[in-house]
Image (cartoon, grey):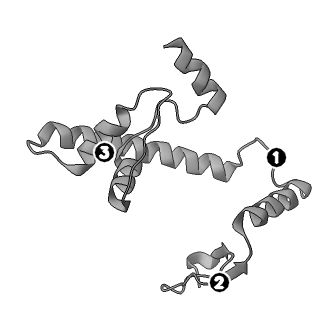
Amino acid sequence: PAEGGAAWVLVEASGWRQDPSHLLTHRVHAPPLPFVRALQAHLSAAGLLTPGQPTEYCEALLSLSRAAGRACHLAMEHVEAQSEVLLEPVVARAVVQGVPLGSALFLGNSMPIRDADFYGGPYPWSTLTAEERRLRSREE
């Protein structure tokens, strides 16, 4: 069972996903998106979720994510300053941060995708809607 009595739920349609660590407490055979939408509707009806308003748990996760991002950013700056060789994380960071506003970056293979996701740092425009990105790209 999960640590501290927490439920570990897997929602997937195929039934093929394995649980090699035996952490799951619940397995739901359903397409994930309709399941999440139904769960959101249920939580909203119960007054436990206000659409568009982050929960305290969500705020805590976002705060932790920002702190981890800052720590990673500082560590990457240190790695860049100390390294005399070209390292994959440094390349991933430079590529991601060099993507101009209004442009797209396509990566292939799993490691470059993971490197860009983990080391790329925050995209300055990642929290903007598509319309906001379009308008800002016109301003540049």
The amino acid beneath tag 2 is Gly
Vertical placement of residue 106 versus 43, above or below: above
Residue that appears at 80% across and 63% down: 39
Question: In the rendered image of this protein, does residue 16 appear above or below residue 44?
Answer: below
What residue does disc 1 label?
50
N-terminal of the pair, mark 2 or mark 3, is 2
Helix, strand or loop under label 2: loop
Residue 5 horizontal/vertical position (percent): 63, 79
Badge 2: how crowded within 10 Å, few (<14), some, or many (20+)?
few
Q: Disc 3 versus disc 1: distance between alpha carbons?
A: 37 Å
Residue 126 locus on image (x, y percent): 53, 36
Q: Measured from the top left, where is residue 46 in percent x and y? A: 90, 58
Secondary element at tag 3 = helix
Per the image, the residue denoted by label 3 is: 92
* Residue type, numbered disc 1: Thr
Does 14 appear above or below 86? below
Tags 1 and 2 in contact by the CB under 8 Å rule? no
